[in-house]
Image: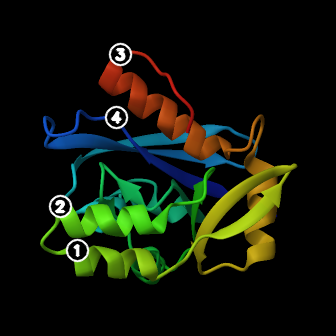
Amino acid sequence: MKAGLRILGIDDGPFSKNVDNETILVGVLMKFNSYVEGITIKKIRVDGTDANEIILSMFNGRFNREINFIMTNGITFGGFNIMDIALINEKTNIPVISIVRKKPDLESIYSALKKHFSDYEYRIGLINKSYPEKITVNNNDLYVNFKGINLTDVKNIIKKTVKMGNIPEPVRMAHLIATAIIRGESYGKV
C-alpha cells in the first residue's frame, strides 16, 4: 500500500448518560506515515440515528477527494447511534473498517436495545449487517467489521497504521482529540 494513501479515522467524544443530548464526532485525516492532514468535528445525537448522516458529511467535507479509507472505533457512537458500514461504503465508494479491542457482547447489546428503544428492530438490523471478525495483528486480538475491502488488506492497513499498542493511529488520534475537547484533556484507552 502506498504511503500517500489517507485514512479518515473517526471516534466519538465522551458524554454523560441521561444528561447529554449530544457529543462530538471527530475525524482525523492521516497518511499512513501518521502525518495529520486535517481534522473535522461534528456534533452527534446521543442514542440518536444520525451517525450515517454525520459520517457522510465528514466525508463530503473539504478533504473528500483525499480520503482513501474510513476507519472507525466500533460501529456505535454516542451510545447506540449505530453506523451502517454497508451504506457508508456504498455512498462513499471507499472501504470502511471498524475496529474494537474487545469482542462485542451481542446478547447484552440486543437486550439493552430492546429495553430502551422503540426502534430496536431497526438498530439490531444495523448491527446484524456485519458481524465483527476476530483478527490478530502484531500479536494483539482485534475485532473488525469491514466493507469494500478484503480481510487481507484490512490486516495490512491495520499493521501499517499501528504505531504502538493495537489501535491504528488515525482512530487513536480521533479518540484523544474528542476526549480532550469534551473533558479538557485526553484520557482512556480507545
Give the crowd class for mark 2: few <14, some 14-19, many >=20 residues within 10 Å: few
Question: Given the current orientation, which residue lies at the most extreme right position?
Answer: 139
Q: Given this view, does label 3 or label 1 mark the residue nearer the observer?
A: 1
Give the residue at mark 4.
Answer: 14
Task: Work out whether mark 4 precedes mark 1 in sequence or the reverse, and give the earlier one.
Answer: 4
Compute the Cα span from label 2 to label 3: 30 Å
- Look at label 4 and name its amino acid: Pro
Compute the Cα span from label 4 to label 2: 20 Å
Q: Quadrant of the N terminus?
A: bottom right
Give the residue at mark 3.
Answer: 184
Check the image and report above or below for 185 versus 10.
Answer: above
Are the residues at dot 4 and dot 1 in contact (C-beta closer than 8 Å)? no
Q: Given this view, does label 4 or label 2 mark the residue nearer the observer?
A: 2
Are the residues at dot 2 and dot 3 in contact (C-beta closer than 8 Å)? no
Are the residues at dot 4 and dot 3 in contact (C-beta closer than 8 Å)? no
Q: Position of residue 190 (x, y in %)?
A: 55, 39
Q: Given this view, does label 4 or label 1 mark the residue nearer the observer?
A: 1
Would residue 162 appear left or right of 7 to someone viewing this image? right
Give the residue at mark 1.
Answer: 120
Give the residue at mark 2.
Answer: 116
Task: Work out whether mark 3 precedes mark 1 in sequence or the reverse, and give the earlier one.
Answer: 1
Name the residue located 58 percent from the left edge and 38 percent from the top edge.
172
Name the residue located 45 percent from the left edge and 46 percent from the top edge.
11
Compute the Cα span from label 4 to label 3: 11 Å
